[in-house]
């Protein structure tokens, strides 16, 4: 997730330095489980074999799928799945290598060359999904009824065919696929490399410094208000200096999306994302309306509380995520962080912690901060025949422990769902955040239960509330920003000032009157990668957080058998939709009351904080 919050921050500490030694031995990943090296014979063979298999697959099956019986169609899907999994393994390796150092031109070249090779091969497979979607419903029903083997792929067929109303002619689909590497993907890369290369001049109290965006973001949580201000000013000014290129990227990608959406017949800019998440438009609308309606009771109320704690009427925007005065900001060694998270997971379920332990027994996690490394954190599922990898930028703060709990939740989910196979293991974004946020909640509740000192408890509650507000309120505000930008872009190209005005409107609405802004904050929209890489992705965070709040409330009320039902939900991967997954817990995301239930949990935490004020 991207936001001006510490989870995205990273300050480089060389190996052997005092700062690094305080953290203990930090693990680094070993990508050789995917391929030994970029120039390895294994990778070359994977590309060459996939190309030959894809060409053969196309010649053998194009134009014939509707005439196959159920068993033969199942075997054809299995062959397609095998080729696609190999290509996904290649791209996983290339993207992870690139994430390790995005400023290395050799990594960038390798990533681009793999994208181009995989896209060229995938063009031979494109017919398959298109032709699957053209099989008449009654014909497919006969094929499914006659074959147990095909029944296994019923969820994939269901999801693939959901795109039927928006499918274009085969040649147009092929054109869009082949142009992707020179279109949207190229603009994404331009954004990534521009951000990675930017340096910000920070007027630090200890002397002026040139810093990366990750280093500047880290300073926004510094204990010294003067440091926070200097970092915030430097970030805004640096983004302002580069606003022209970020505006061009934003305008181009928004127009690109508008054109494709028009051709595909999507009614709204968000509709394509909702379809990929297999969630109805009205469910997302209910979530957004519920969160926006709760702004006064959540973010507005909390930030006024925090302003009172700081003895001011309004917080400067650079103090929004400032540590509380009672926060001792002590360093947590990596081994201690691992113990805390695994203990929380283990108390919930021995089966859950057994899967989690594999990430630490093997080189599946990359934790040190390095120049050029992707800032923030993520869990990459790779492919079921391998295993997920986690990327962190661990700096020993409580927030880093929570980030570990979050990404480990993703990783465990990806392992458990892998049993569904390559085509059906991927979970829609709205449900992909469930295990991660639930893992955070388990860890937070464990640490909170162990906190006897009221001051420590207050700091922990405040930190959790801020994390949730960044996940729910901020992400819905980001969604609203995207919605307004895309709607406005449909009327013509946007000036930088117009985008900035939209940004300031949604920030003022969502954060409330207790936050004071200065002019440079107008440009903060420009560094958030989700707007570029995954339009309208952001509401999935709020969806997942509210879902987990409701889910955890069920767990607290009736814990017997809950862990087993929860693990079954994770194992389902992409085979079930949200209604089916939540039914065993008595929850229904299509009911507006569901969202208010989750938001009430956040309100309750703020209520408790108010009593500690």
Image: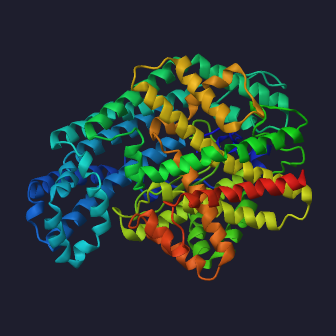
Can you give x and y, in whole percent of width and height, for residue 528 in the image? Answer: 56, 35
Residue 570 in view (yes/no) = no
238 and 260: which is toward the camera: 260
Query: In terms of image quadrants, where is residue 75?
Result: bottom left
Q: Relative to 320, is 444 above or below? A: below
**Quarter of the picture holding the N terminus:** top right
Query: In terms of image quadrants, where is residue 534?
Result: top left
- Would residue 576 be found to the left or right of residue 456 on screen? left
Q: Relative to 587, is 429 above or below? A: above
Count up the numbered dots.
Answer: 0
Can you give x and y, in whole percent of width and height, for residue 113 in the image? Answer: 34, 38
Which residue corresponds to the image point at 74% horizontal and 65% vertical from the top-left?
Answer: 445
Can you give x and y, in whole percent of width and height, for residue 124 in the image? Answer: 19, 48
Can you give x and y, in whole percent of width and height, for residue 242 in the image? Answer: 56, 19
Query: In terms of image quadrants, where is residue 259?
Result: top left
- Would residue 213 be found to the left or right of residue 38 on screen? right
- Would residue 69 be found to the left or right of residue 419 on screen? left
Which residue corresponds to the image point at 60% horizontal and 23% vertical from the top-left?
Answer: 239
Q: Relative to 546, is 496 above or below? A: above
Q: Relative to 554, is 45 above or below? A: above
Residue 520 in view (yes/no) = yes
Which residue corresponds to the image point at 71% horizontal and 43% vertical from the top-left?
Answer: 296
113 and 38: which is toward the camera: 113
Which residue corresponds to the image point at 46% horizontal and 71% vertical from the top-left?
Answer: 571
């Amino acid at each position: 997730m991207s936001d001006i919050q510490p989870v995205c921050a990273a300050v480089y500490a060389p190996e052997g330095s005092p700062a690094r030694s305080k953290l203990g031995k930090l693990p680094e990943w070993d990508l050789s489980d995917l391929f030994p090296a970029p120039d390895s014979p294994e990778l070359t063979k994977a590309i060459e074999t996939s190309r030959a298999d894809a060409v053969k697959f196309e010649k053998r099956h194009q134009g014939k799928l509707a005439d196959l019986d159920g068993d033969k169609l199942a075997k054809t899907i299995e062959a397609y799945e095998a080729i696609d999994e190999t290509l996904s393994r290649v791209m996983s390796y290339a993207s992870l290598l690139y994430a390790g150092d995005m400023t290395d031109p050799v990594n960038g070249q390798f990533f681009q060359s793999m994208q181009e090779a995989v896209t060229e091969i995938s063009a031979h497979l494109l017919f398959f999904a298109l032709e699957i979607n053209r099989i008449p419903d009654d014909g497919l029903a006969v094929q499914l009824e006659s074959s147990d083997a095909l029944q296994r792929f019923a969820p994939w067929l269901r999801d693939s065919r959901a795109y039927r109303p928006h499918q274009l002619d085969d040649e147009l689909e092929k054109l869009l696929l082949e142009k992707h590497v020179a279109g949207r993907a190229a603009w994404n890369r331009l954004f990534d490399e521009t951000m990675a290369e930017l340096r910000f001049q920070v007027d630090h109290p200890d002397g002026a410094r040139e810093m990366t965006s990750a280093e500047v973001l880290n300073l926004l949580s510094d204990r010294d208000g003067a440091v926070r201000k200097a970092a915030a000013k430097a970030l805004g000014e640096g983004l302002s200096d580069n606003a022209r290129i970020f505006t061009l990227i934003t305008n181009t990608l928004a127009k690109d999306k508008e054109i494709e959406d028009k051709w595909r017949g999507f009614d709204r800019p968000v509709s394509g994302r909702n379809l990929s998440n297999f969630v109805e438009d009205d469910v997302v609308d209910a979530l957004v309306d519920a969160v926006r309606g709760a702004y006064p009771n959540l973010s507005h109320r909390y930030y006024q509380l925090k302003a009172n704690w700081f003895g001011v009427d309004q917080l400067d925007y650079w103090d929004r995520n400032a540590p509380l005065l009672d926060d001792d900001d002590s360093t947590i060694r990596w081994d201690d962080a691992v113990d805390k998270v695994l203990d929380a997971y283990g108390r919930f379920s021995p089966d859950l912690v057994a899967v989690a332990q594999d990430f630490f027994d093997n080189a599946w996690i990359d934790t040190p901060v390095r120049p050029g490394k992707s800032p923030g954190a993520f869990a990459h599922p790779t492919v079921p025949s391998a295993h997920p990898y986690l990327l962190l930028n661990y700096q020993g703060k409580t927030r880093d422990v929570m980030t570990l709990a979050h990404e480990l939740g993703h990783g465990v989910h990806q392992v458990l769902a892998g049993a569904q196979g390559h085509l059906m293991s991927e979970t829609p974004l709205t449900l992909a955040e469930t295990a991660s946020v639930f893992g955070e909640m388990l860890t937070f509740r464990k640490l909170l239960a162990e906190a006897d000192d009221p001051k420590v408890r207050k700091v922990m509650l405040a930190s959790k509330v801020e994390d949730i507000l960044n996940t729910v309120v901020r992400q819905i505000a980001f969604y609203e920003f995207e919605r307004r930008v895309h709607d406005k872009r449909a009327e013509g190209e946007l000036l930088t000032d117009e985008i900035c005005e939209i940004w300031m409107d949604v920030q003022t609405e969502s954060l409330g009157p207790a936050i004071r802004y200065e002019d440079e904050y107008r440009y903060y929209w420009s560094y958030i990668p989700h707007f570029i890489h995954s339009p309208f992705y952001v509401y999935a965070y709020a969806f997942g957080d509210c879902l987990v709040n409701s889910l955890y409330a069920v767990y607290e009320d009736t814990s017997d058998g809950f862990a087993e039902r929860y693990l079954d939900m994770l194992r389902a991967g992409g085979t079930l939709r949200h209604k089916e997954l939540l039914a065993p817990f008595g929850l229904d995301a299509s009911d507006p009351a569901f969202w208010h239930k989750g938001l009430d949990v956040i309100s309750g935490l703020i209520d408790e904080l108010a009593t500690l004020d």
